[in-house]
Amino acid sequence: MDGRGRYAFFTPNMDEDVRQRETINRELRVALADCDSQLRLHYQPVYLLATGRVVAVEALLRWEHPENGLVTPDAFIRTAEETGHIEVLGNWVLRKAMNDARAWPDLRISVNVSPIQVRSRLFVTTVRRILQETDIAPSRLEIELTETALMSASLEVTEALHSLRELGVTCALDDFGTGYSSLSHIRDIAVDRIKIDRSFVNAVDTVPGAALVEAIVSLASANGLHLTAEGVETRAQLDFLRRVGCHEVQGYFMAQPLAAEAVTELLQGQRGS
Ligand code: C2E
Ligand code: CA
Ligand code: CA
Ligand code: CA
C-alpha cells in the first residue's frame, strides 16, 4: 500500500507486468553498456510507386537478447522511455543508421524517434554532430514521430523539429490515422510526410476503407505533403494505392526489414535494371 490506496488496484496481472518490466529494464541496462553486441538495425525498403525503385529505408531496432532471441521494439521501447534509457538507445540508433547509410549514397534514411528523446536539450546538437561525423547530407535523414506523439507534443518538441528543418532534416508523421487528428491540424505542424498506418491500408478492400484512404491521399497531396503507405501486404492493396495516387509504399509484399548487407545487395540488383 503506497498511502494513496493504489494497492487496491493491484491485480496479480499487473504485478506480473511490473516484474516483467523490471527484468527488461535490468537486461536493457546490460545491453546498453555495449550496444553493438546486442542491438541491431534492420532496414525496410520504401518504394517510389512512379518508378518501382527503392528510394528510402526505415531503420527498425532489434534486440538480440542472449536467451530470448530477437526481440522487437514494441516489447522494450516503452520501458526505455520510462527509465530514461531511450536517450542512449536513440542516439545509438541514429549513429548506427547514419553510418550504415554511407553505403547507400542516394537513399533517404528514416529513423524512428521517441518524443522523450526529441525533448532533450541535446537532441538537435546530437543529430547535427552525428551528421557531421558520418558526412551524411541532412536532407537524407528523415525522423519519424507517431501521430500521437506529435499531437501532444510539448513546446520543446516543436522547437526541436523547427531547428531540424532549418538543418535540412525532414520529419514524417508516423502511424497516421491512429491518433484521431484532423488533416487541417496537420497543416499547422511542421511535417513533410504522412505515413498512412497499416490498419488503413489493410482496410482498402472494403468500401469505406478505400474511401478513407482515397480522402487522406487527396487531402495530403493538396497540402503539399508527401505520402507513404505502410504495411502493404497484397498486390490488390498496392494496385489500389497506385490508382489513388499515393507516392510511396512499404510493406511485406515488397520487402521485409533487412540486414544492412541485404539492402546493399538489393540496391546492386536494382542498379542494373
Ligand atoms: P513503425 O514505425 O510503425 O514501424 C513499422 C512496423 O511494421 C515495423 O515493426 C515493421 O517490421 C512492421 N511492418 C512492416 N511491413 C509490414 C507489413 O507489411 N505487415 C505488417 N503486419 N507489419 C509490417 P517493428 O520493427 O516491430 O517496430 C514496431 C515499432 O517500434 C515501430 O513501428 C516504431 O514505432 C518502433 N520502433 C522501431 N524502431 C525504433 C527505434 O529505433 N526507436 C524508436 N523510438 N522506436 C522504434
Ligand atoms: Ca515508423
Ligand atoms: Ca508506422
Ligand atoms: Ca507503429
Image (tube, rainbow, N blue to C red):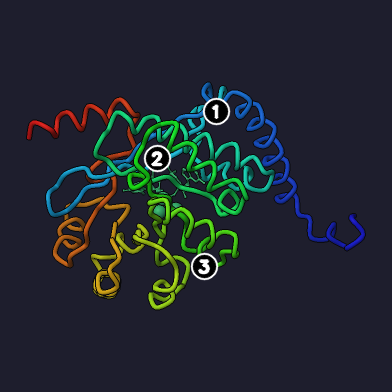
Give the Cα distance between marks 2 and 1. 22 Å
At mark 3, the secondary structure is helix
Residue sitting at the far right? 3
Residue appearing at x 27%, y 68% in the figure:
224
Label 1: which residue? 68
Q: Quadrant of the N terminus?
A: bottom right
- Look at label 3 and name its amino acid: Met
Q: Which one is nearer the viewer's eye here, 213 or 159? A: 159
- Look at label 1 and name its amino acid: Asn
* Disc sitting over residue 59 in the figure: 2
Give the Cα distance between marks 3 and 2. 23 Å
Q: Residues within 10 Å of mark 2 (few under 14, many from 20)?
A: many
Query: Is the CB–ligand 1 distance for label 2 below 8 Å?
Result: yes
Q: Residues within 10 Å of mark 3 (few under 14, many from 20)?
A: some
Q: Earlier in the sequence, mark 1 or mark 3?
A: 1
* Disc sitting over residue 151 in the figure: 3
Quadrant of the rendered image containing residue 258: top left
